Each structure stands twice: as C-alpha cells, then as structure tokens.
Image (spheres, rainbow, N blue to C red):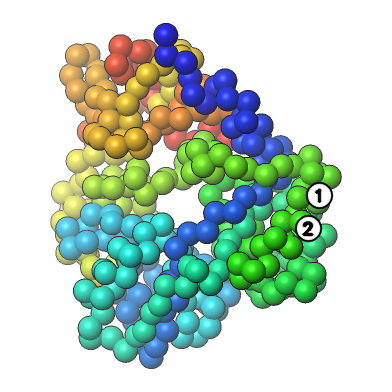
Amino acid sequence: MNKNIFKYDDMKRSEHMAVRNSVGWYLWTHHLLEITGADVTKFLDYIFPNDIGSLSVGKDRYTTMLNEDGEIIDDVVIMRLEEDKYWVSTLYGSKMDDWWYHNGADYDVEWNEITDEWEMYAIQGPKSKELLEGLVKDSISDLKFFSHMNNYINDIPCIINRAGFTGEKFGYEIYLHPENCDELEELIKPAAEKLGGKQVTEFQVMAWTLPTEANFYYMRDLAHTNPFEVGLEKNIKWDKEFIGKEALLKIKEEGPKREIIGFEVPEADIYIQSKQYGGPGEPVYLDGEEVGRVSKLVYSYLREVNNGYILALKDRLRIGDKIKIHGYDAIITEKRWL
C-alpha cells in the first residue's frame, strides 16, 4: 500500500496550517541579482515581457522570462529600488546571468549577483502584519502588496517587502544582511509563538503545498510551456519589443495547444508520478485516450484532498470531468483551493 507522504505528516500539516490560521516564518533566500546603468530599464523591458518601464521606485512586479520560441525559461520578481537600480529575485541566478550576458551587449548596464550579501525571511499568514508591526521602527500599515520600504527591526537595517506566494492577504519578506540573522530570529520566534505561529522548516510546504492551494506555480511547473498555456498571458505588454514576442504573436493568433488545469484525487493513499519529481509526469486518460500529463501533485490540508495540476491538451478536459490517472479515479477542478 502506498502511504500518502503529505496527509499523515504532522510536521508538514502543522507548519502549513500555522500559515493559514496565524503566522509562519521561514528563511528562504532566492538568488538576487542587482542591475544598474543608464539603459537598465530599457534592457529589462527587452528581457522580460511584462511592463518594467512603468514600475515605480519602491514597487515590485512579477514576470516570466522567455526564449526566442516564446517558451518560459524563468519566472522572477523585479524590485525597483532606485530610478536606475533594480533587484531581480530568481531561483536560477547563474542561468539569469548567462542569459543577460548573451543579450546585453548593446546596453549600458552592469549587474552582479548579491545573494551572499542578503538573506530573506518570509513572514506569512493572517497575523503576519500584527507580528511585524510589533517589531519594526516605521509602521508597515500602509504598505501595499508588491511594495517595499527601508526599515529597522531593533537596530537591524532591512528592507520590508509586502509579497509572498502563499495566497495569504498579508505576507512579508524581510531582506537583511547575513550577520544580523541570529538576532532577527531571536526576535521573530517569541513574537510568532505568542500569536500561535511557528517556524516553517519543510521545503515541500514552502514551495509546494502552500503555493499550490493558491494557484501559484513553481518554475518546474512552467518549464517547456508558454504564457498562454499557463494563464500568464495577462503579464505581457504587447506594445514593446521583447525576446520571444514574434513567437508569442503566432501562438496568440493560432491559439495555444495545451493548458494547465486543476485536479483532485479523493483516494488518500496513492502513487502518481508528477513532473515536480523529474520526468514527464503520469499520463492522464479520458475515455481511454491520453489527454495530458500530471505536472504537480501535492496535498491540500485545507480541503483534505490530493490536489495538483495537469498540463492537458487544450479544451479536452472540463471542470467536473472524471478521469483516470495510474488507475486512480480523479476529477477536474478549479486551480485554487483556498
């Protein structure tokens, strides 16, 4: 019998539900690249399909990064710290560096990976604002989503960014220098525990169960897809030039051939291969015909059900359809479980 690696894991469950019911905190620093120069905005507007030029200082923007075929090769958050200085947060710093080097020869820009200079603590959940308000020097009460500000916690200089991929209304990221991490943890831990929160230590909770409930993707979900297939075409600014635009215009005209959809498997103890573990993912059958592959399979602690994504042939599966995956009964659902 296959035992569900999520359902019966009390640690994962308690950490996941701390974020949903109170507050959870965890250290999870992505790769950070700092880019400056006279042409920096022009360059980023060419590299990324989303609108970077209109981004105000102190604001963030999510965007994909595409190759010439319109295929997603990364998804990032861009923070505009100054008029000609940005941070780009990615899981793949070396890949980003190579891509910029390949495409940046004609631009007056300079970039450096600064990951070793900064750490990032995520504070997520309905009580995260209350927790941070009790720690920061300057109030964060007016800080909007995808906005950041310079601040202090005790005497620790930091950048507070209101952001996160848990789906919670309130969530923040604290950027600070590594030598201040121990002091910060000594402040966060009792404040969080007083509110009924706890530290999140499980990677699968940070990267999989929380984001999937909220219909957020991990980069592996996006690999070898284009924005139309995964519902990210709204993040494209068409009235500018960017890498992959010509290919995307053709896809837009012809229509995407695939789409990401949600599904659930009611049976608790299952074994289904998904792309998140490597490989192509388990085939999905409707009336005996393969119509897609399992992109991700995790567990929703809110709904108490196995849930995930299928990369399916366009318009072949509808919400409510009953399908078979590796012999298990499954049903097509919305992609959001919050």
Q: Is residue 305 above or below residue 153?
A: above
Q: Are marks 1 and 2 in contact (CB under 8 Å)?
A: yes
Looking at numbered disc 1 in the image, what kind of residue is underneath it?
Pro
Q: Which mark is residue 84?
A: none
Q: Residue at x 37, y 13 (%)?
A: 329
Estimate the x, y position of residue 319 in percent, counting from the top left: 39, 26
Crowding near the residue tagged with mark 1, few <14, some 14–19, many ≥20 C-alpha atoms within 10 Å: some
The numbered disc on residue 190 is 1
Residue at (72% x, 51% y) in the render: 128
Residue 9 in the image: state x and y as whole percent.
58, 25
Q: Quadrant of the N terminus?
A: top left
Give the spatial CA distance, label 1 vs label 2. Answer: 6 Å
Query: Residue 145, position in %: x, y?
Result: 60, 60
337 to 47, vertically: above or below: above
Q: Quadrant of the C terminus?
A: top right
| Residue at the spot of label 2 | 187
Three-letter residue code for mark 2: Leu
Q: How many marks?
A: 2
Image quadrant in which you'd find residue 2? top left
Residue 68 placement (x, y as % from top left): 18, 63
- Callout 2: helix, strand or loop? helix
